[in-house]
Image (spheres, helix red, strand yellow):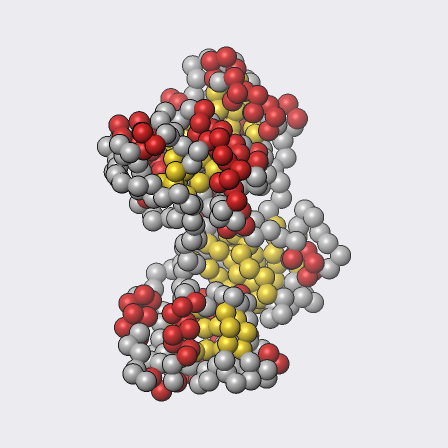
């Protein structure tokens, strides 16, 4: 067998690392958390990501980085608006992506959580709130007939991913610089919304508007998450380019225009859809579990696109948007147009998690003889699991023991971690990356038998 020359590829993918002494201080909170909160020493604020009760570990996401913390179920305190019978059950009930504050102690480079505080829902008086039904009725009428002004308090990058129709972006962090967007009539109905029940940006906008003298101000507390479950959002051509095209974020573009129109040009990657056959579309559409962002396009952002978008939302898809102004607006913005044959079936491949390795690349490495791999296969499963089988030549170190056994892991070779489900291997990835290793992880489920052979989900 010829040696596999994949080491260079892995090195390039991982990039260079700074020494601990040279590395800048890492912010203790996600950017959006700093809008409303300060973070004390030995605290972190971010989004609850992954819980591994088997190893008493959890992951906290802070924008483009992840923190791994240990915990002791006997001493950990969890403050939650919906406490369960046990600490473990309360932790399990925290939704992925929910904002939390964590207090921790640190010893020998290992952070141990001592307190997890789950962000509670916003509380406002009934007369200060608007329901989903209220907002739906107003949007259906439109601002002129409904006599309302709807403002999205989220930062511009979130607004560009999709917003409630008729909303204007007035980010809470930049509220004072954009008061000219507010109506001249201070008795007019003004409604703010943001990222959901625990987000303080729209209540903060309400307070600022009140100080400016506005007397009929409300907050749609459930915000964009609730809207996205029940109805389609909208985004402009420039927002689509900035939020998805420029960031290379995968999405599904559905073109509902007649063949005679699409023959003249269409958006790159668009899929032809007949508005009268949404049921047929759904038979082969990517699973809603993948949460594919979807943009529906017609000529002007009219009835055809709205009908298809509504059908997808009704089928359980969130994150569905209609392109404002349709294909004509896309062309008017001078954005790229393709010609040829439109695709006829929608596909969606989620953007890989940072640091992950594909199943095919992992298979090539793991099936190669250990002497010619050029990488370290690091199995971070617990010892009871590895008794049933391990990949030949793999280094076996249970994930909780990694920090104590770093000396056993070579630093002159790329490292690829795996466990049985991908959860602990990602924990290992973040721990080793923090220590300066050139590391990636397998996010897939894997089963290894006593011969060293394996199968991937």
Q: Is residue 265 above or below residue 415?
A: above
Q: Is residue 396 above or below residue 122?
A: below
In the current view of this chain or complex, which residue is farthest to the bottom?
371
User: Is 208 left, or right, of 123 in this rendering?
Assistant: left
Q: Is residue 262 above or below residue 347?
A: above
User: Is 227 left, or right, of 249 in this rendering?
Assistant: right
Q: Nearer the viewer, residue 302 or 335?
A: 302
Q: Nearer the viewer, residue 204 or 11?
A: 11
At x 45%, y 24%, the residue is 303
**Residue 125 spot, x, y in % from top left:** 65, 28
At x 49%, y 34%, the residue is 277
**Residue 445 spot, x, y in % from top left:** 53, 67
Q: Nearer the viewer, residue 121 or 447?
A: 447
Q: Quadrant of residue 360?
A: bottom left
**Residue 128 spot, x, y in % from top left:** 61, 25
At x 33%, y 67%, the residue is 14
In the current view of this chain or complex, which residue is farthest to the right?
85
At x 31%, y 29%, the residue is 261
Camera sees residue 427: no
User: Is 51 left, or right, of 353 in this rendering?
Assistant: right
**Residue 79 spot, x, y in % from top left:** 66, 52
């Amino acid at each position: 067998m010829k040696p596999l020359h994949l080491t260079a590829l892995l090195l390039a993918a991982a990039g260079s690392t700074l020494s601990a002494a040279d590395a800048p201080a890492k912010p203790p909170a996600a950017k959006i958390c700093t809008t409303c909160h300060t973070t004390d020493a030995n605290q972190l604020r971010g989004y609850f990501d992954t819980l591994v009760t088997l190893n008493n570990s959890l992951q906290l996401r802070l924008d483009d980085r992840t923190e791994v913390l240990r915990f002791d179920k006997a001493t950990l305190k969890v403050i939650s608006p919906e406490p369960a019978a046990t600490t473990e059950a309360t932790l399990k009930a925290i939704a992925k992506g929910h904002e939390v504050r964590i207090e921790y102690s640190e010893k020998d480079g290992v952070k141990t959580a001592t307190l997890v505080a789950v962000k509670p829902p916003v509380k406002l008086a009934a007369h200060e709130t608007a329901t989903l039904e209220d907002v739906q009725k107003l949007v259906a009428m439109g601002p002129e007939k409904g006599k309302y002004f709807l403002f999205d308090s989220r930062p511009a990058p979130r607004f560009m991913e999709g917003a409630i129709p008729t909303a204007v972006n007035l980010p809470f962090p930049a509220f004072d610089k954009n008061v000219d967007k507010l109506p001249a009539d201070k008795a007019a109905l003004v409604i703010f919304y943001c990222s959901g029940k625990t987000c303080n940006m729209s209540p903060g906008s309400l307070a600022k508007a009140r100080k400016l003298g506005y007397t009929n101000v409300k907050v749609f507390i459930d915000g964009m998450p609730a809207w996205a479950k029940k109805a389609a959002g909208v985004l402009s051509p420039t927002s689509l380019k900035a939020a998805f095209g420029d960031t290379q974020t995968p999405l599904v573009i559905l073109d509902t225009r007649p063949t005679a129109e699409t023959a003249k040009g269409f958006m790159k990657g668009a899929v032809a859809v007949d508005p009268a056959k949404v049921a047929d579309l759904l038979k082969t559409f990517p699973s809603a579990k993948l949460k594919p962002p979807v943009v529906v396009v017609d000529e002007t952002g009219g009835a055809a696109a709205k009908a298809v978008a509504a059908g997808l939302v009704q089928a359980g898809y969130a994150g569905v948007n209609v392109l404002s102004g349709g294909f004509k607006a896309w062309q008017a913005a001078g954005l790229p147009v393709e010609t040829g044959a439109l695709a006829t079936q929608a596909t969606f491949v989620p953007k890989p998690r940072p640091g992950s390795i594909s199943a095919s690349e992992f298979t090539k490495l793991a099936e190669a003889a250990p002497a010619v791999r050029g990488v370290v296969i690091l199995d971070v499963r617990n010892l009871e699991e590895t008794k049933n089988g391990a990949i030949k030549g793999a280094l076996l170190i249970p994930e909780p023991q990694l920090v104590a056994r770093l000396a056993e892991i070579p630093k002159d070779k790329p490292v690829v971690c795996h466990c049985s489900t991908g959860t602990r291997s990602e924990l290992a990835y973040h721990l080793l990356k923090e220590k300066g290793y050139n590391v990636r992880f397998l996010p897939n489920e894997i089963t290894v038998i006593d011969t060293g052979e394996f199968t991937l989900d």
